[in-house]
Structures are given as C-alpha cells and as structure tokens.
Amino acid sequence: VVTFKKCGAAYCAIVKTGKFAGQKAGSMSGKDGSYRGTLTDLEAKKTYKGKAKITGNKASMAGCVLGGLICKTEIWVK
C-alpha cells in the first residue's frame, strides 16, 4: 500500500505497509494528470526516471532506463 503526499513542489509516494513501510518509493511533479520524476525499486535499491498519467481512479506508472527508451509500466488503482 502506497500513499501520496506533497513534498516540496512534488508529490512523494510513501510505502505504508510491509518491510519498506515509511520509505519513499518515488517523487513526481507535473500538472493536468501528467507527471515526471523518479521511481525507486526498494527491493533492488535502484532509482529510475519515471512518468505517470492519472486517469480517473487509475495511475499508469512507468519506470524507464536508457533515456526513456525502455520502460516498464504498471497500472495502480485507487
């Protein structure tokens, strides 16, 4: 479970449960439902450039490498 909260000019994803509870899993800023920033794979301890698109109660989250050429996308539902 992840919650989002304001952190400066961005929104941060904070893990609420499990072994990573309390840790930041990403930070993004933007407007009109499109966001860019970083996403962190807490298990692998790696941070990637990321992007998100919010539509209704769904967030399409993508972590990317190689300047955005290769991305892995997940759909998160509220």
Image (tube, helix red, strand yellow):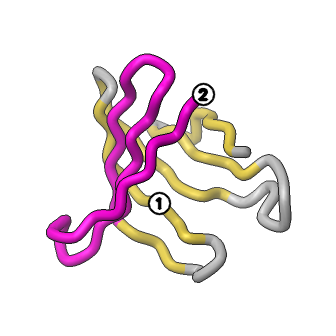
Q: Residue 29: percent from the left, percent from the top?
A: 38, 39
Q: What residue sits 42% from the left and 59% below the top?
A: 38
* Residue 78 badge: 2
Q: Secondary structure at mark 1?
A: strand
* Residue 39 badge: 1
Is 67 on the left or on the right of 77, as rendered?
A: left
Q: Residues in magenta?
A: 49-78
Which residue of the protein is positioned furthest toward the top in this rendering? 56
Disc 1: CA contacts within 10 A as few (<14), some (14-19) or many (>=20): many
Q: What residue sits 29% from the left and 21% below the top?
A: 32
Q: Residue 65: percent from the left, percent from the top?
A: 27, 74
Residue 19, by quadrant, is: bottom right
Q: Secondary structure at mark 2?
A: loop
Whole-number angstrom distance, CA of label 2 to CA of label 1 = 18 Å
Q: What residue sits 36% from the left and 55% below the top?
A: 73
* 28 vs 57: above or below: below
Q: Residue 25: percent from the left, percent from the top?
A: 60, 58
* 37 vs 20: above or below: above
Disc 2: CA contacts within 10 A as few (<14), some (14-19) or many (>=20): few
- Main secondary structure of the magenta stretch: strand
Q: Residue 34: percent from the left, percent from the top?
A: 29, 33
- The verdict on residue 53 being magenta is yes
Given the image, on which type of amino acid does mark 1 rest?
Leu
Is 47 on the left or on the right of 50, as rendered?
A: right
* Residue 30 badge: none
